[in-house]
Amino acid sequence: MAQNGTGSKKRGKPNILITGTPGTGKTTTASALSEATQFRHINIGDLVKEKNLHDGWDDQFDCYLINEDLVCDELEDLMEEGGNIVDYHGGDFFPERWFDRVVVLQTENSVLYDRLTKRGYIGQKLTNNIECEIFQVLLEEAKESYPEEIVVALRSNTIDDINRNVVTLTDWVRSWSCPS
């Protein structure tokens, strides 16, 4: 494949990172977008569990301690191919070169609170995630980690929002061309 100026191969299809606080609709959006575009949906949480890409369990937050190096090693070849939708609540550890669009889903606090409590989030885990959304931590993280022109924040309060986001992103994929 042809090389661009940075020495990386040009991809025939873009890669998209869908990020946001837990409960903002990342997996729902990524699944629907995968179906609409025929892109591969990579749920990092599932990948970490399936391939043991972690350093153990965090009892306080009831989740795996992700090993970022192992995750990146696991994904490198797939990401070079293009046509991936990566679904994860963070994104600052992924190589910048992997993504052509970074989507930060945002949800109103009252809607998010209801979604997280239905998932069984309580105590510090619930509080931390609500505060993360209030202070737009993941949007700021994305803007600091990726070129600002590829970062987009999308509202994700309702199923109509999710459907609209999928249409918007599908249109973007169809119009995408690999930068020289």
Image (cartoon, rainbow, N blue to C red):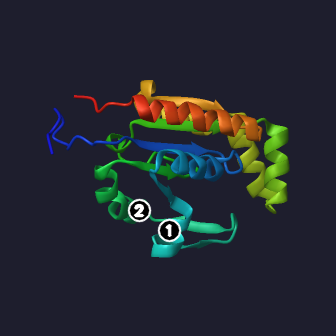
Q: Which residue is mark 2?
A: 71
**Residue 3 seen in this snapshot:** yes
Give SS at disc 2: helix
- Where does residue 34 sit, x and y in percent of width and height? 52, 50
Residue at 51 percent of width and 36 percent of height? 170
Q: Nearer the viewer, residue 175 or 137?
A: 175
Label 2: few (<14), some or many (≥20) within 10 Å? some
**Residue displayed at 53% across by 59% down:** 43
Residue drawn 35% across and 46% down? 95
Instruction: Indicate left or right for 138 with 102 as reference.
Output: right
Name the secondary structure under disc 1: helix
> In the displayed structure, does residue 118 sit left or right of residue 93?
right
Decide which of tag 1 and tag 2 comes sooner along the chain. Answer: 1
Q: Which residue is mark 1?
A: 48
Q: Are marks 1 and 2 in contact (CB under 8 Å)?
A: yes
Q: Is residue 106 visible?
A: no
Which labelled disc corresponds to residue 98?
A: none
CA–CA distance between discs 1 and 2?
A: 7 Å
Q: Residues within 10 Å of mark 1 (few under 14, many from 20)?
A: many
